Image (tube, rainbow, N blue to C red):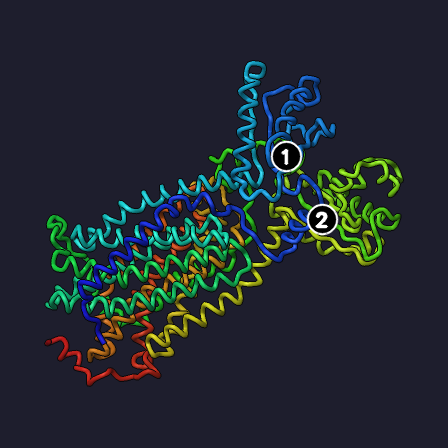
Amino acid sequence: MTRSVPSARRQISTLIVWLLLGLAALPMALKVNDELEAQARLRGSESARVEATLRARFESPFARIALLRMAQAPAPESAAGKELLKRVTDALKATPGVKGVISYLDREDTLFVGRDESAILIVGLNVDEPSGDAMMAELRKTTNELHAALAHQYPSLTFGWTGESAVNADLRRISARETRMAELRVLPITLVLLLIAFRSLVSALLPVLCGALTILIALGIIAAVNRFWPASLVVVSIASMVGLGLSIDYALLIVSRYRDALNGGLGHGAALADAADHGGRTVLVSGSAVAIGFAAMLLVPVSEVRSIGMGGLVVTTVAVLAASTLLPVALAWLGPWIDVVPLRLWRWKTPFNWRGWATWVSRHPVSVLAVGGLPLVLLAAQGLHLSTDLPRGRWLPDTADSVRVLHEIDAVAPGNFGQIVHAIIDLPAGITIDQESGWRAVSKLVRHFARDPRIQHVWAITTVNVVPLGGPELLKKMPQSMQRNFISADGRSVLVEILPKQRLTATDAAAMVRQFRAADLTALSGLPGMRLQLGGVPAFNVDYENAIKQSLGLVVLLVIGATLLVLSIAFRSALIPLKAVTLNLLSVIAAFGAVTLVFQDGYGAHLFGLPRPLDGGFPIVPVLVFCIVFGLSMDYEVFIVARIADGRRGGLPDRTALIEGIASTGRVITFAAAIMMTVFGGFMFGQFVLVKILGFALGVAVLVDASLIRLGVGPALIQLAGRWNWWPGGRTPAREPRSEAEHARK
C-alpha cells in the first residue's frame, strides 16, 4: 500500500512542529556541554560504595580533593616558604566549599614538596557541592587574587590546579570546542560530496539541513533528559558523529529515490509517494537496527555507556522522523524545483559501471567470496588481539591546563596523587578500633600496604602518631576531629589512604587493587571476619572494566537476537537475516583488527597525532564499537536487500533482481559511505583519544562494509542461495516472473 502526498494543511502542521522543536532545542543544545558529567559513574560497585561511605560515615575533608601546585616560590622548608604557604592556605580555607587543606605546613613530609622545590597542596572539597565547575571557578578566583597580591614580591610565582573536578571542568570546555571544530571540518566536505552525487545545489542542501536539524534537536533533548538522568560528556561527540552520518544517509536515500522516480517518468505526486513508501520503509528498518544497538547499551551498568545508549536512541529516532516526515514535506514543496540549480559543469558520470559489476558478481560468486573474504578474515584475525586495558602513557588532552599541571606534578612529586586509593576496613561485629584486637588487626593491614613496593605512603589512624608498639590508648591523645577523619562514629570502620609511587601506571594500579581485593584478610590481620573495600580512581577502573566485561555477552546476544527478529519480519526470510548478522559480525571484528594494528601496535599511529602506540585501548571500546557498528553496518544491507526484494515483487527473476538491486543502490551506497566516513574522520583528529579510536573504528567498519561486504561478499552469498534467500516467506515472486531475456528486451 503506497502513501499519498500529504495535504497542504498537514504539510504546514508538520513544518510548524519541526520549527517549534528546533527553536525549543536551540538554547538547551548550546549549553549541553556545560551540564554533562565528564566522569563516568558506576552505581552499585565497590568503588561507588566506598565513595558513599566516605560521605555518610566519615568526616574526612579529603573524600573529594583538588591538587594545587605552587611553583617558582621559596622552598616550603624555608621560613619564607612557610610564610607563603600560610597565606595561601588561609585564603583557600576561606573559599566557600573548601573543607580543609594539607601541605608541608601541616605535616613536614617531603611528599608535599616536588623535586623542583614546588609546593603541592591537597585541598578537600565539599562532597555535596552540586557543580565541580563552580567550585573550581571559586578556587581559581582565589589563586588569581593571591597571584595579583603577591606579584610584586614573587613575580615568577605560578599556581596550577588539577584533580578530578579541575580536569572535568577543562574536559567539558574542550569537548564543546572539539565538537564544533569537527562539524566545521565535516560539513564542507560533505556538501561537496552531495553536490557531486546530485549535481544540484538544492538536492545537496536538503540532507545537510536535515543533519544539522537532527543534531540540534537531539542535543536539546539530551540536555533536557540530563536534568533528571545525568548523562556523560562523551555523548555529545557520539550523538553529533552518528546523528550527522545517519540523517544525511537517510536523506540521501529518500532524495535519490525521489529523483530516480522523476527521471523514470513518474509525476511529482507519484514520485513522492514512491520515495515516502519504499524509502520510508527502508529508513524505518535501518533505523530500527541502529536503535537496537544503542538500546542494548542501557543494560551496561556504567553511566558513560548508558548515556551513549540514550543519546544514540534519541538521535536515531530524530533522524528517522526527520527523514520520514519533514523531508517528504520539503520534497512536496520543491517538486521539480529539486533540480532548479543544476551544476552543468559537473555533469560527470561515474566511471564505474555498477550494472556490469553486479552482472560479474552474479556470474562469479565463488571467486568474489574468495577474493573479497580473504582480506576481511586477515584483518579480523588481528581483532582477536585487541587489549581492553587502559592505555599507558599520556592520553588526556595536553591543552587542558589541569592535565598539564597533573603531568607536572607527576614529574616532580614522589607519589602518584592521581592514583590515590581509599581503603575502608570494616572490623567484625563487636570489635572496634579502640579495642586492642581491632587496633592490632588494622595496624597489621596498614603495615602490609606500606611494605608493598608499589606504595609510596600510607595515611591511617595508626600512623598519625608514630610510637613504637603504640596501641589504642593513643586515641585518647588525638583530637576528636582527627579521629573522625579516619574512624567512623561507631568505631567499626577505619579509613586508610594509600598513595602509590610516582611511576605506577593506571594499568598497574588497577592490578594492585585486584591483588588487594583478593588477599586473605584473616591471614594478614590475624582477625577473622574483617572486610576490605577499595575506592578511588584505580578501584573505579577495575569496577568499570569488570562491569563492561560482565555485560558484553548479554549485550551481544540481545543485539544479535533483536536484529534477527527485525530483519526476519521485514524481509519474511530466515537466511537473509542470518547472512546479514554474520557479515555484520565480520565488519565489527575487522574494525577491532584495524584498531589493534593502528592504536595498539602503532602502525600509522602518528597520522592521528599519537607520538607512540597506546599499548592498549579502553574497556569501553568493544561494547561501543560492537553496538554502533552493528547497527550502522545494517544500513547498506537494508538498502540493497530492500531493492532486491522490490525487484522480485515486481516480477524479476532472482538473478536479475540482484543485478538491479546493486545497480540501483551502488552509487547511493558509495556516496553514503563516503559521507559517513567523512563524518567519522572529522572526529578522528581531535584531542580525545577515545573519540579518535571510535571515529577510526566506525570509519573502517563503514569502508569495509560498503565495499567488500555489501557490494561483493554479500551479493555473492545471495546469488549462491538463490530462491532460498526468501524462505519461508515465499521462494517465488509475487507474480509470474519474466525471463531475463524478456526483461532485457523490455
For disc 2, the marked residue is: 57
**Residue 356 appearing in the image:** no
Quadrant of the image containing the C terminus: bottom left
Q: Indicate left or right for 489 with 270 as reference.
A: right
Q: Nearer the viewer, residue 126 or 169?
A: 126
The residue located at (80%, 44%) in the rendering is: 447
- Whole-percent x and y of residue 231? 48, 52
Q: Within 10 angstroms of label 2, few (less than 14), some, or many (20 or more) residues?
A: some
Mark 2: which amino acid?
Arg
SS under mark 2: helix
Q: Is residue 633 above or below residue 561?
A: above
How far from the left and from the top, in percent, is residue 72? 59, 21
On the image, which quarter does residue 147 sit in? top right
Query: Is residue 229 or residue 382 the one in the foreground?
Result: 229
Distance from the alpha carbon under mark 2 to that under mark 1: 20 Å
Which residue is painted at 13% across and 55% down in the image? 339
In the image as oriented, which residue stretches furthest toward the top?
A: 152
- Mark 1 Cα shell of 10 Å, populated few (<14), some (14-19), many (≥20): many
Which amino acid type is marked by label 1?
Answer: Val
Q: Which mark is residue 740?
A: none
Name the residue that disc number 1 marks.
123
Task: Look at 80% across and 36% down and name the residue there.
Answer: 479
